[in-house]
């Protein structure tokens, strides 16, 4: 059951990322002359597909490395554990930077609401 849930999650992510690729490639290709746009879109999509498949197979191979190859501070680390650790650190870092930016924006907007309009401002 866990494998099916992982497959569904991975499929959903691939669909979203695939749509993102299509939009990006369409925007970039639209800057080319009309006769080159179709070829550029097909080439871009083919490269995106090959890169994504290559990365997925590489990740699958790395996740299969379950035999510990190094021990740090008494903790055995395998390829799988390192990938999971790096993924967790990346996700935590992104969450921190996004929440910090949101707090700064909220703080700035709250300060703006509390400030009385100056005499020279355009508020009426």
Image (cartoon, grey):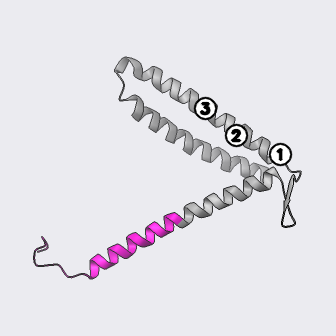
Q: Secondary structure at mark 1?
A: loop
The residue that disc 2 covers is 56
Q: Position of residue 118 (x, y in %)?
A: 15, 78
Quarter assignment of residue 122: bottom left
In the rendered image, the vertical position of residue 122 relative to residue 63, given as above or below: below
Q: Position of residue 82 (x, y in %)?
A: 76, 55
Q: Which label sits on residue 64?
A: 1
Q: Residue at x 61, y 47 (%)?
A: 13
For mark 1, does the 10 Å Cα neighbourhood hold few (<14), some (14 to 19), or many (20 or more) residues? few
The residue that disc 3 covers is 49
For mark 3, does the 10 Å Cα neighbourhood hold few (<14), some (14 to 19), or many (20 or more) residues? some
Give the spatial CA distance, label 3 vs label 1.
Answer: 23 Å
Q: Which residues are magenta?
A: 97-124
Mark 2 and mark 3 in contact? Answer it, CB < 8 Å: no
Ranked by sequence position, the earlier of labels 3 and 1 is 3
Residue 22 located left or right of residue 124: right
In this rendering, the count of numbered labels is 3
Could you tell me which quadrant the C terminus lies in?
bottom left
Residue 49 located left or right of residue 57: left
Q: Is residue 1 visible?
A: no
Ranked by sequence position, the earlier of labels 1 and 2 is 2
Give the spatial CA distance, label 2 vs label 3.
Answer: 11 Å
Mark 3 and mark 1 in contact? Answer it, CB < 8 Å: no
Q: Closer to the camera: disc 3 or disc 1?
A: 1
Q: Is residue 72 magenta?
A: no
In the rendered image, the vertical position of residue 107 relative to residue 15, given as above or below: below
| Prevailing SS of the magenta stretch | helix
Q: Is residue 75 visible?
A: yes
């Amino acid at each position: 059951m866990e494998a099916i849930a992982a497959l569904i999650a991975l499929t959903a992510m691939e669909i979203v990322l695939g749509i993102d690729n299509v939009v990006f490639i369409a925007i970039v290709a639209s800057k080319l002359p009309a006769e080159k746009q179709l070829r550029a879109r097909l080439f871009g999509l083919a490269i995106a597909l090959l890169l994504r498949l290559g990365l997925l197979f590489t990740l699958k191979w790395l996740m299969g490395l379950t035999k510990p190859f190094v021990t740090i501070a008494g903790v055995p680390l395998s390829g799988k554990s390192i990938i999971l650790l790096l993924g967790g650190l990346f996700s935590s870092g992104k969450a921190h930077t996004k929440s910090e930016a949101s707090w700064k924006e909220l703080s700035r907007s709250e300060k703006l609401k509390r400030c009385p309009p100056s005499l020279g401002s355009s508020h009426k």
